[in-house]
Image (tube, grey):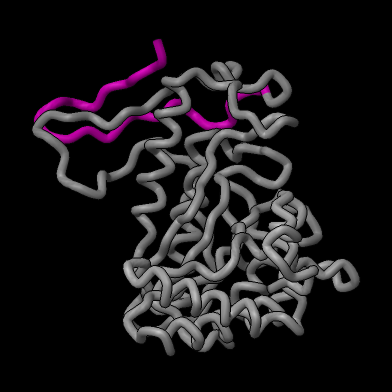
């Protein structure tokens, strides 16, 4: 399907091979394979086309080959719909990378306290969105931290990026259902392990990230065009819950004094906290409380 030697015994299952995109002259073969899978497994009702644009980086142009991906996507979309029009197909499964606002690839129009979106990712998404044959849902993934593993302004405030991305994507696609296939709030080490935080720390930030994704607002009724967006400034780590909490229940939150080192974080990223202590928003009759890890 990718242009390699045919035959079951010749399949290369290495990670490098699996992350190599099909060659353009085999896009139709890949679409035919997708259709075969859909026929063989009729209970599978949702298909995500490809994974994170892997293999679609254009070294010569130093940008994503969004034309190639969109061509592959459209062939797969049409092939699956021909099998069964009720099959749900989505993409583009881009990694929504963010960078330091001073980075030359920083978007001048999509930024916040968490950094700035990588303009090359925005360009890829815009092209797919404009030229796609259709879509039943949208898929993205990403992290709250920048490409340099910076959590701006801190690990809780950085999750504002997830809200901003959710809102922006839904604006661009006119409220198509949004799937976050993956999300990360804790930077990994050189071995791609995430062991620098305590479990209490990790769960608190992950919960804040999930809330942030759910808070992504639907697009305005008047327009679906892009507008300049800045994420809210640093604020309480916990926002409104997406579902009604139990009476008197409080959202988890952690605070510490300005100038102190972030607790339990990786040593190489240890630095003064740049935002004031925050207070959890609470529900029911309980007054606002401050929480800290044990």
Q: Which residue is found at the position 74% from the left and 70% from the top?
A: 6
- At a point 42% along the width and 77% down the height, the residue shown is 39
Closest to the observer: 226 or 276? 226
Q: Nearer the viewer, residue 227 or 174?
A: 174
- Kindly give the residue lying farthest to the right in the view shown: 60
Task: Report whether residue 2 is seen.
Answer: yes
For residue 280, what is the image quadrant? top left
Name the residue located 49 percent from the left edge and 29 percent from the top edge.
276
Is 252 placed left or right of 282 in the picture? right
**Residue 219 in sight:** no
Residue 268 spot, x, y in % from top left: 73, 23
Does the magenta stretch mainly form a helix, a strand or a loop?
loop
Q: Can you give x and y, in whole percent of width and height, for residue 57 in the image?
A: 78, 66
Q: Position of residue 123 (x, y in %)?
A: 67, 74
Report the span colored magenta.
270-294
Relative horizontal placement of residue 261, taking residue 6 as reference (left or right): left
Q: Residue 83: which quarter of the image?
A: bottom left
**Position of 144 relative to 3 (above/below):** above
Residue drawn at 35 percent across, 37 percent down: 238
Quarter placement of the C terminus: top left
* Quadrant position of the N terminus in the picture: bottom right
Q: As displayed, is residue 75 above or below residue 188?
A: below
């Amino acid at each position: 399907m990718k242009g390699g030697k045919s035959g079951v015994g010749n399949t290369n299952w290495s990670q490098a091979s699996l992350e190599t995109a099909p060659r353009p002259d085999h896009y139709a073969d890949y679409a035919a394979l997708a259709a075969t899978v859909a026929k063989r497994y009729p209970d599978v009702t949702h298909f995500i086309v490809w994974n994170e644009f892997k293999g679609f980086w254009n070294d010569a142009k130093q940008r994503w080959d969004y034309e190639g991906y969109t061509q592959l996507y459209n062939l797969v979309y049409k092939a699956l719909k021909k099998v069964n029009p009720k099959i749900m197909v989505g993409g583009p499964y881009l990694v929504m990378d963010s960078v330091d606002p001073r980075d030359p690839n920083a978007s001048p129009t999509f930024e916040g306290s968490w950094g700035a979106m990588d303009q090359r990712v925005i360009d890829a998404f815009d092209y797919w969105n404009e030229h796609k044959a259709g879509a039943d849902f949208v898929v993205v993934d990403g992290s709250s931290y920048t490409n340099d593993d910076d959590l701006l302004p801190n690990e809780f405030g950085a999750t504002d990026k997830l809200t901003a991305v959710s809102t922006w994507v839904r604006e661009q696609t006119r409220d198509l259902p949004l799937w976050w296939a993956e999300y990360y709030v804790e930077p990994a080490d050189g071995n791609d392990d995430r062991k620098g935080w305590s479990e209490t720390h990790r769960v608190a930030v992950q919960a804040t990230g999930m809330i942030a994704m759910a808070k992504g607002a639907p697009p305005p009724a008047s327009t679906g065009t892009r507008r300049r967006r800045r994420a809210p400034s640093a604020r309480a780590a916990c926002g409104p819950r997406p579902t009604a909490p139990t009476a008197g229940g409080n959202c988890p939150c952690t605070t510490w004094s300005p100038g102190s080192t972030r607790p339990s974080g990786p040593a190489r990223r240890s630095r003064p906290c740049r935002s004031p202590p925050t207070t959890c928003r609470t529900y029911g009759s309980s007054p606002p409380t401050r929480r800290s890890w044990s």
